[in-house]
Image (cartoon, rainbow, N blue to C red):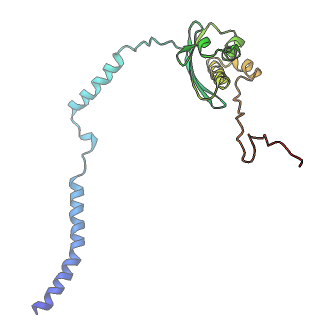
Amino acid sequence: MTEKSKPTEKKEAAKRTPHSKKKDTEVKEKTHQRKPPAAKSSASKETSVKPVSVKTERPKKTSKKPETRIMFTGRRKESVSRTKLVKGTGEVTINGKKLTEYFKRSVDQYKVKQPLVLLGLEKDFDIHANVYGGGTTGQSEAIRLSISRSLQKINPEYHKKLKEYSLLTRDSRMVERKKYGLHKARRASQFSKR
């Protein structure tokens, strides 16, 4: 009889274990619950209020940076420009160099200053530009677009004049890819009749 009773005891034990485990986990969950936040002591409430009053009593930091400092990006062909406009005397620095050092051609120098000259602001703002990619034409036109966007942000009234000269439009023309069987994008080999 002992042999027969053993298997039944195992079955009963197997039946009991899942329920007993559930009861154990329920008890654990109940014991590990956090206390509600209302149970805090009054001393901790007083300490949490004091830093708030200190923050309001501090004087606001006065920044030495000028108020008008706008940064925008411009693109043209493969060139990307990030330009910062700051109230100043009209200095233009591109990648740490002066305008005349960076762009040797007068056409490129004119393109960079074109939005400022158009609005009569060439001596009101300093320009700091970082530009990379492409050649001189693409870079100068990328800087021009970023300056135009910055000026429009400073004063929305400039929008009409800049738009009239299409200085706010991103020129989407890119170099066409070379095709196989041709010398360049469209240049084919010379035609031979015989």
Using the rendered view, name the quadrant where residue 80 is placed. Answer: top right
Number of marks in the rendered image: 0
| Residue 157 visible in rendering | no
What residue is at 24 percent from the left and 27 percent from the top?
47
Task: Answer with left or right where residue 2 lies relative to residue 83.
Answer: left
Work out whether 165 lies above or below 191: above
Quadrant where the N terminus sits is: bottom left
Work out whether 32 lies above or below 44: below
State the image coordinates of residue 66 (x, y, percent, origin top left). Answer: 51, 12
What residue is at 69 percent from the left and 29 percent from the top?
170
Using the rendered view, name the quadrant where residue 172 is placed. Answer: top right
| Residue nearest the viewer, comparing 145 with 11 | 145
Task: Answer with left or right where residue 148 lies relative to residue 52.
Answer: right
State the image coordinates of residue 72 (x, y, percent, origin top left). Answer: 58, 24
Using the rendered view, name the quadrant where residue 52 is placed. Answer: top left
| Residue 6 visible in rendering | yes
Task: Answer with left or right where residue 160 lies relative to residue 128.
Answer: right
Work out whether 56 lies above or below 78: above
Q: Residue furthest right?
A: 193
State the image coordinates of residue 90 (x, y, percent, origin top left). Answer: 60, 8
| Residue nearest the viewer, comparing 182 with 135 | 182
| Residue nearest the viewer, comparing 105 with 142 | 105
What residue is at 25 percent from the left and 31 percent from the top?
45
State the image coordinates of residue 159 (x, y, percent, origin top left). Answer: 70, 20
